[in-house]
């Protein structure tokens, strides 16, 4: 009996050595609490899995429901109070990349999220088309980077910065 317990315990310990192949990050609450309105859309090619490069081994973070839905929900939530009739914001080609960097011994290691998207803003007639490229960073511990929480935080802060930049580029509608 004792040998079986030790064998099972050893198998469990050894099975955990390789780490998780995919780190799950559930952001469905962020999406669920967002107002559902068609005036703002964000579409992307990235899907739900982000590959984190720069660590000893590549890590994969699965964002659920998907990255574009999370960015759309956060931007929509932040801009909803400023919405006015006939404002349309359509963002396409969302690309998100995550990397970790620990080159400089003086600086703490960081996780970087790079977000790129093309948006078209129409405000009662006047239109603006613009590409946005943003970078958000957060310090991490390379031994235990906690990507399940670091990546969502970076997505939220990048979405906030995108919302601010979008609002700054909303053309002033002509007086009627």
Image: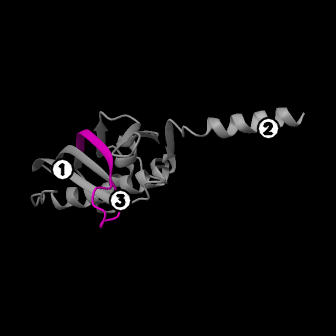
Q: Earlier in the sequence, mark 3 or mark 1?
A: 3
Above or below, 15 relative to 117: above
* x 34%, y 53%: residue: 76
Location of mark 1 (residue): 132
Location of mark 2 (residue): 6
Q: CA distance from mark 1 to mark 2?
A: 56 Å
**Circle 1 or circle 2, nearest the eye:** 2
**Circle 3 or circle 1, nearest the eye:** 3
Above or below, 95 relative to 104: above
Q: CA distance from mark 2 to mark 3?
A: 38 Å
In this rendered view, identify the residue nearer to me: 14 or 156.
14
Residue 88 locus on image (x, y percent): 23, 47
Above or below, 62 relative to 139: above
Q: Give neighbour class at mark 2: few <14, some 14-19, many 20+ (Cα, 10 Å).
A: few
* x 16%, y 57%: residue: 170
Which corner quadrant holds the C terminus? Answer: bottom left
Question: What label does residue 109 carry, if any?
Answer: 3
Q: CA distance from mark 3 to mark 1?
A: 26 Å
Which color scheme does this rendered protein use? one colour
Magenta stretch, main secondary structure, is strand
Q: Residue 103: which quarter of the image?
A: bottom left
Residue 120 appearing in the image: yes
Which corner quadrant holds the N terminus? Answer: top right
Q: Earlier in the sequence, mark 1 or mark 2?
A: 2
* x 51%, y 50%: residue: 29
- Disc 2 is placed on an element classified as helix
Residue 68 locus on image (x, y percent): 35, 41
Q: Is residue 163 left or right of residue 52?
A: left
Above or below, 170 relative to 53: below
Magenta-colored span: 90-111
């Amino acid at each position: 009996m004792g040998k079986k317990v030790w064998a099972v315990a050893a198998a469990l310990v050894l099975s955990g050595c390789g780490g998780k192949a995919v780190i799950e990050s559930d952001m469905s609450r962020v999406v669920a609490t967002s107002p559902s309105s068609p005036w703002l859309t964000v579409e992307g090619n990235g899907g739900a899995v982000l590959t984190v490069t720069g660590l000893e081994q590549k890590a994969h973070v699965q964002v659920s429901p998907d990255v574009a839905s999370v960015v759309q929900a956060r931007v929509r939530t932040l801009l909803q109070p400023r919405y006015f009739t006939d404002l349309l914001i359509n963002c396409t080609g969302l690309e998100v990349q995550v990397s970790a960097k620990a080159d400089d011994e003086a600086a703490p290691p960081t996780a970087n999220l790079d977000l790129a998207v093309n948006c078209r803003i129409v405000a009662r007639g006047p239109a603006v088309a613009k590409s946005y490229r943003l970078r958000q960073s957060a310090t991490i511990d390379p031994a235990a980077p906690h990507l399940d929480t670091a990546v969502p935080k970076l997505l939220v802060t990048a979405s906030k910065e995108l919302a601010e930049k979008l609002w700054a580029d909303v053309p002033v509608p002509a007086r009627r």
